[in-house]
Amino acid sequence: MYYSGPVWTEDEPRAAVKAFLTGKWLVAGEHCAKFEREFSKMFGFESSLMVNSGSSANLIMISALKKHLDWGDGDEVIVSPVGFPTTIAPLVQNNLTPVFTDIVFEDLNFDLEKVEAAITEKTKAIFISPVLGNPPDFDKLKEISEKYDIELVLDGCDSLGSKWKGKELSEYAIATSCSFYPAHHITTGEGGMVSSNDKDLISLARSFAWWGRDCYCVGSANLSKKGACGNRFDKWLDGYEGKIDHKYYFSNMGYNVKPLDLQGALGLEQLKKIEDIHVKRRENKEKAESIFKEVLGDMVHIPGELDHAETSWFGVPIVCNKNK
């Protein structure tokens, strides 16, 4: 019995092979760019950036947010103790301080009273990672963030398609990450996405993802003498009067986390199936929960979803009752 894995047909490998055979380069190109556009359109973002994993998406997102919002070393970000290590690692890697707050037993998400109690003058954001895709109370989280003038950031790697009061969870956050690992809702083999309604933030994220390069031009126009922006050779460097090639100006301490273009082709095919996948995941969770309750009874507790949540389940949470 497989509890997770990729869901695809012959369409995905055909699209990947076609992208491989017809593309001029193997690296991120037209298929990744189209996947970014279609993903943004489907989930209501102004802009998205595809990277090579969900972990890289978190790293790039936090790196970009820190610079974009002028967070300082030692500033605090509230996180859950129940989640994946690469939700926490990017905070430490960026010299930010993760502040762990406890959870509630009912859904394994934040105890929101303890979240509010943990906020200090150094708190910059609440980094939300819905457990197995199950949303916490986003109305209350939004209320807290506005009260204390801090940001909501979403690690959406486990929760693609989940909603709160009919709205995408990402609508509540300044930026959202996503993972396309085979066990996740849709897959590109490996892969991830950083998305936001702040285009400047995504441009900065692209810089961090592409070696720290300052130039954000993409596409074939970038190969021309003027570049996609028309100002490829210009006075880009402060304190230097001469013109330089913006394509080779690096203003950030970046990484190289670009995907392959064939992964973008896989993603485009997977988007066509996402609604069916969402429905099936909800059905499977209900079936699994029914079986576990029938067989194990009160030996286990299976957390459910809140009244206003529509969870696209990443898995089935099971808590063993210690006295049983």
Image (cartoon, rainbow, N blue to C red):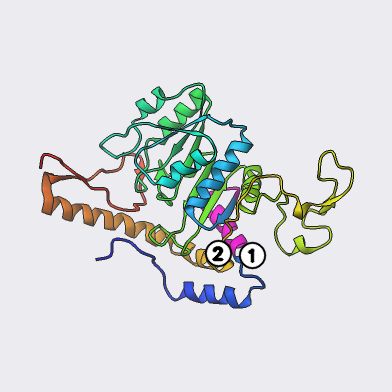
* Quarter the N terminus occupies: bottom left
Amino acid at the residue labelled 1: Gly
**Does the magenta run of residues contain 154?**
no
Crowd tier of the residue under label 2, counting other residues whose Cα lies within 10 Å: few below 14, some 14–19, many 20 or above? many
Left or right for 273, reference 72: left
Q: Which mark is residue 245?
A: none
* Residue visible at 75% across and 50% down in the picture: 249
Q: Secondary structure at mark 2?
A: helix
Q: CA distance from mark 2 to mark 1?
A: 8 Å
Q: Is residue 288 above or below residue 321?
A: below
In the rendered image, residue 37 lying in the magenta stretch gets the answer: yes
Residue at mark 1: 29
Q: Is residue 259 depicted above or below 78 in this figure? A: below
Residue 246: percent from left, percent from top: 78, 52
Q: Give the answer, above or below, for where 178 lies relative to 309.
A: below
Residue topped by disc 2: 264
- State yes or no: discs 2 and 1 in contact (Cβ < 8 Å): yes
Residue at (50, 47) in percent of width and height: 58
Q: Quadrant of residue 299?
A: top left
Main secondary structure found in the magenta portion: helix
Residue in the picture at 51% in, 24% down? 122
Helix or strand or loop: what does disc 1 sit on? loop
99 vs 113, nearest the viewer: 99
Task: Compare marks 2 and 1 and give the one earlier in the sequence.
Answer: 1
Q: Residue at x 48, y 72 (%)?
A: 12
Which x, y percent locates residue 291? 17, 56
> Which quadrant of the view contains residue 227?
bottom right
Q: Quadrant of residue 78?
A: top left
In this rendering, does residue 41 appear at all?
A: no
Magenta residues span: 32-47
Q: Quadrant of the C terminus?
A: top left
